[in-house]
Image (cartoon, grey):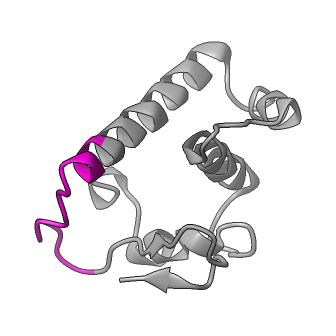
Amino acid sequence: MGRDHGLDDEKILAVPDHRRSPVFSELERRVLDYAEALTHTPAEVPESLVKELLEDLDREQLVELTGYIAWENFRARFNRGFQVDEQGFSDGPSCPITRPGAAATEVSA
């Protein structure tokens, strides 16, 4: 999906290390931090992060971003509930999945 929207493999593979990777802009880092915060259980987003995002995004854009993140979380949890695994629809590199509690550099295939 990311490739369909202009993401190259270098960026896709750098997501687990997005805070240190030079391929992301500051806004992209904040968006990834926001997505990560919303994905944790419980979802706790620092007010400071929302304020920083609103420096570059308007409220409508933040609502849209939050909706996309929530939808992907819904799909992931739904699939886990039915033990739906990878179906092999993606060619080439994909974003590794970070194991819960693992450091950003420790990922599972």
Residue 108 relative to residue 5: left or right: right
Q: Is residue 28 shown above or below 101?
A: above
Instruction: Report the residue at 34% width, 50% height from top.
Output: 5
Q: Which of the 4 image quadrants contains residue 74?
A: top left
Residue 79 relative to residue 73: left or right: left
Q: Quadrant of the N terminus?
A: bottom left
Q: Dominant secondary structure of the magenta stretch? A: loop
Q: Is residue 19 shown above or below 91?
A: above
Instruction: Report the residue at 65% width, 68% height from top.
Output: 18
Q: List x then y, in percent, for residue 15.
A: 55, 68
Query: Residue most toward the right?
Result: 48
Instruction: Report the residue at 46% width, 25% height from top.
Output: 67
Q: List x then y, in percent, for residue 61.
A: 57, 22
Magenta highlight on residue 13: no
Instruction: Report the residue at 61% width, 50% height from top.
Output: 36
- Count all numbered tags in the image, as a single digit: 0
Q: Is residue 64 shown above or below 27?
A: above
Q: List x then y, in percent, for residue 50.
A: 77, 30
Q: Quadrant of the C terminus?
A: bottom left
Residue 11 relative to residue 75: left or right: right
Magenta highlight on residue 86: yes
Q: Which residues are magenta?
A: 78-92
